[in-house]
Image: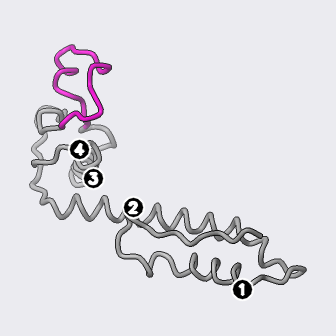
Amino acid sequence: MDWKNQVQVSEYVELMNEKLGLEPNTIYMMPKSVQEGGRAGDITGDYEWSIDDIVVPSGVDLPAVNDSEITNRITDKMWAAVRTRRNRALKNSDVMALQDRVMTDEQKTYRQALRDLPKTQSDPFNITWPTKPAS
């Protein structure tokens, strides 16, 4: 494991708990300095996480995990977040499609662009969202 950021290490820890059939947070993250009595407030935003920052109960052996497993989990969660945001935007735009209203071409285009997400995008970390029409 050579990940340095919190998201990657957090996914690794979550995956370990799942693979081993453990309760969530049985294996958890805590900076080594905090484990040794330091203050959590001293940890800065650019902290580089390491294997020493993962707390594993005695007697638990961690299975091997490759980087692609972690990357895939993070990417899958981002796509899920994109779909959630898209669904919320669609729901919020439902008022445009009420029976007593006539949708403009801009509104129709906007709603179709939302429905086409995420298949029109290739990177869940860099989504180009359609622009909501003014009215």
Amino acid beneath label 2: Met
Query: Of 61 and 10, which appears nearest the observer?
Result: 10
Amino acid beneath label 3: Glu
Q: CA distance from mark 1 to mark 2?
A: 30 Å
The reply to whether callout 4 and callout 1 are in contact (CB within 8 Å) is: no
Q: Is residue 31 magenta?
A: yes
Which residue in the protein does label 1 denote?
105
Which residue in the protein does label 4 denote?
5
Quadrant hosting residue 24: top left
Which residue in the protein does label 3 denote?
18
Q: CA distance from mark 2 to mark 4?
A: 16 Å
Q: Secondary structure at mark 2?
A: helix
Q: Is residue 135 above or below residue 70?
A: below
- Earlier sequence position, callout 4 versus callout 3: 4
Q: Residue at x 18, y 37 (%)?
A: 49
Q: Is residue 59 above or below residue 98?
A: above
Q: How many marks?
A: 4
Give x and y (percent) for residue 23: 32, 43
Which residue in the protein does label 2 denote?
78
